[in-house]
Image (spheres, rainbow, N blue to C red):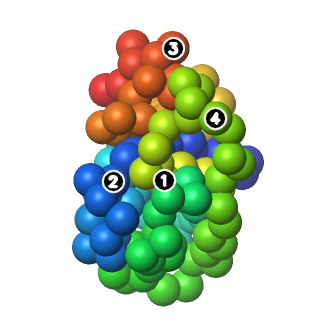
Amino acid sequence: MHIRGIRGATTCDADQEEAILKATAELLQQMADANGVESDEIASIIFTATADLTAAFPAEAARRLNWTLVPLLSATEMAVPAPRAVPRCVRILMLWNTPRSQEEIVHVYLRGATSLRPDLRERRP
């Protein structure tokens, strides 16, 4: 058994609590579904949000999915200027206990965040 990282990112329609939590929950669910993750296999999840998202902690979305025992941490993403930056962006690093190899991990990038890792588009199921 190894601890593997699943990466994901998405963008939010607005800096509003429901917009942040909806986009984050959608991303978490797709990350879990794409990899067959059960919540009791998750070691921890790290969330970052760009500085223009202040209405909610993205980690709250995991609590709404009833992932109440998973250790969660939210932080502010580095303020890299445009054009490299993606506005209203939530990024996730899910640390998962699994026997799978790194090559088998499916990373998930949604909405405006697909531009962050175009190299991973071909790996989507």
Q: Quadrant of the C terminus?
A: top left
- Is residue 124 at least partly visible in the picture? yes
What is the CA distance from the residue labelled 1 to the residue labelled 3? 19 Å
Q: CA distance from mark 1 to mark 2?
A: 8 Å
Say which amino acid is labelled 4.
Pro
- Which mark lies nearer to you, 1 or 3? 1
Q: Looking at the image, is mark 1 or mark 3 earlier in the sequence? A: 1
Q: Is residue 45 above or below residue 56?
A: above
Q: Which mark is residue 81?
A: 4
The residue pinned by badge 1 equals: 90
Percent position (x, y) of residue 62?
A: 43, 73
Residue at the image position 26 percent from the left and 53 percent from the top = 13
Residue at 30% x, 37% y: name it: 111
**Quick check: marks 4 and 1 in contact, CB under 8 Å?**
no
Q: Residues within 10 Å of mark 1 (few under 14, many from 20)?
A: many
Give, as a three-letter code, the residue at label 3.
Answer: Asp
On the image, the x and y values in percent for residue 63 come to 42, 82
Residue found at x 30% / y 59%: 14
